[in-house]
Structure formats: C-alpha cells, structure tokens
Amino acid sequence: MRRIKLLSIFTLLTLLSSCYVDNLDDDNNAISLNELLRSYELWYVDINQTVGNGQTPFLQKAFTISFRNSIVYANNNLVGIGSEGNGYGISIGVFDAYEMVLDVNHDLDGLYSFDVYQIDANTIELYNPYNDTSYFLHGYQRHNFDYDFVFYDNIHYFLQEYVAWEKTYTSDTGAINAFDNENYLQFLAGGTNSTFRSSQDVNTGNIHNIYWDYTGIYAVNDINGNNYLKNLTLDYNYSDNESFELNVINDELIELYHLSSGTLYQFTGRGYIQYFMNDDATIDSSKNSGDKLRIQDSKKTENPRTPRAR
C-alpha cells in the first residue's frame, strides 16, 4: 500500500452503467479478445456493478485481475497492494481466449468459462452462463491505477487480513477507560458492518491460543474531508459503543484514537492471511481464506443476458 494522491478517474466508476455494447462482435473491429485483455495491465473488478444472483469465487475475491502470457494474476489482498507482484498481485491460474470466450482454469477452483462483451473503451463484461452472473471490469495501466483509493475504500477487508491485531502501544495521555483492558482484536470476514472479537489476554505467544472474551459488531465509516482517515465503531455491551479514528501507519500497523478518552493506541497485525489457499493449516477455521468474499453493497438484480451458442 502506497500513499499517493487520489486520481479523479476513479470517480468515473460510479457513473458507468451496465449498458450492453458488443463491440467485439463487430466484424469491422480488428482487435481480438486476447489483444483486448492484454491492452490493460490491470482490470478492476467493480463488485457493485455485478448483475445476477450467482457468485464466481475468484472474481468475488479479487480487487484486480490481469492477463499476462496466458497466466491470470489477481490482487486478492490489500496488504501489499501496489507492490505485490510488481502491482499485478499473485498468479492464480491460466487462461485461454478465443472468439468471444474466456476460459480461466483457476489453480484451486477449477475451470470457468465466460462470454465476453466489450462495454466501452476500457470496460468489459464477463458473463458466466452457468450461474447467470456478469462481472464488470475496468481497465487501467499500473502507472495510473489508484491503489490507495482501492485500499482506503475497502479498508474493512484490510482489517480482516490478519488473524489478530495485538495492542503494542498506549499513549500516556487520555483518561482511563474500559478499552484499556483490551489487548487483542480480530475482525471476521464480512462487509462494512460485521463481527469482531476482543481479548484481554496479555503477551500471548501463539495467536491461535488467544481466548476471545467478547464478540460484537463493528462498523467502518468514512470521515468527511479526509480520504485517509476512517471511523471505527466497536459495539460493546458495557456501553453503547467505542468509537475511534482509524489511521493506517503501514501494512501491519494501525492507530486507534479513542474519541471519548483521548487515548491513542497502536495495534500490530499478527498472522497475515494471503487470500488464495482454501485450506491453510496455519490459520484457524474462523479466518480461512474461503470465508473472504467481497460483499456486493448494491442491490442484486436479475441478469438480462442470455448465453451465446457454443
């Protein structure tokens, strides 16, 4: 994750509609599907434009997809986005593109076949006829892709990319409060309003042995006028909630400024989870990567597409 100035091109994503323009079907269009896929280094998966009620797991996990030399790459994690794999992410499988069909053989999930439609100069639709669901991908080059926008717009997923967050600093300033006793936090997979756990254990050597004292609901919300600062709310029984300003220091360190007491805490991520393997013995069952799917916030709608004859 790199801190750079937000690029205005990302504001266009909310203006793009799901209109259907099959440019690649035009006999006068000389570009092939392979050439189109390679014409952009990154394809941003706009999860909220998804049409249909099904899910294609590898697209539901990915922030970006890339097609390079028959290999499919994906940025499934926010930790390291922009630097992992020189910005492409990790290899997740191989692909073959012919006529208007894209076949992706995912390393773990197997074969997926899509009908491809070109919507505009930098937008394609991947229609999965087997679950009647379309994903919309927007093309960018690495040098003009706003990795920071993606990071901060999806920061709730970043919190979920560690098995636990350990309190490693508490400021001397600030009033004594109940949260002083909480030493570990865990954010479980889900959307912007999901489940967290906290523990008062001290100096636990094995993060998988943490005893979680409390389970509640958390929410991450924007702060007007600051793209890099978020509001984190933890719902505890002993009060209405605990509210913090959430500031990301780096890919494994966050600051939580406790609004009611004025205390500043730092939490360090423990047990990084790379979202690719479906079964990883190094993490507990509540945090395996199979649980992590990006949540579509927009209302799901029926897909008007019909499968092409094959």
Image: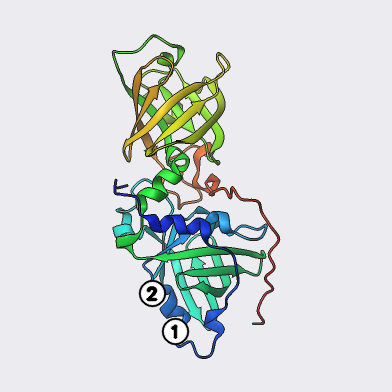
Q: Report crowding for label 1: few under 14, some 14 to 19, many 20 or more residues within 10 A (C-alpha).
A: few
- First-in-chain label (2 vs 1): 1
Q: Secondary structure at mark 1?
A: loop
Q: Which mark is residue 31?
A: 1
Q: Secondary structure at mark 2?
A: loop
Report whether residue 211 is seen: no
Q: Is residue 291 left or right of residue 133?
A: left
Q: Residue at x 42, y 32 (%)?
A: 164
Q: Is residue 18 left or right of residue 230?
A: right
Q: Is residue 232 left or right of residue 8?
A: right
Residue 227 in percent (x, y) is at 39, 41
Q: Report crowding for label 2: few under 14, some 14 to 19, many 20 or more residues within 10 A (C-alpha).
A: some
Instruction: Look at the picture and state if 202 lies above or below 290.
Output: above
Pointer 2 with pointer 1, Cβ within 8 A? yes
Residue 4 in percent (x, y) is at 29, 49
Q: Amino acid at mark 2?
A: Ser
Q: Residue at x 32, y 47 (%)?
A: 1
Q: Which mark is residue 153?
A: none
Q: In the current view of this chain or complex, which residue is farthest to the bottom?
A: 28
Q: Amino acid at mark 1?
A: Ile
Residue 189 in percent (x, y) is at 53, 40
Q: Nearer the viewer, residue 69 or 78?
A: 78
Query: Which residue corresponds to mark 2?
Result: 39
Instruction: Look at the picture and state if 111 lies above or below 79.
Output: below
Residue 108 in percent (x, y) is at 50, 59
Report whether residue 129 is seen: yes
Location of residue 37 (image quadrant): bottom left
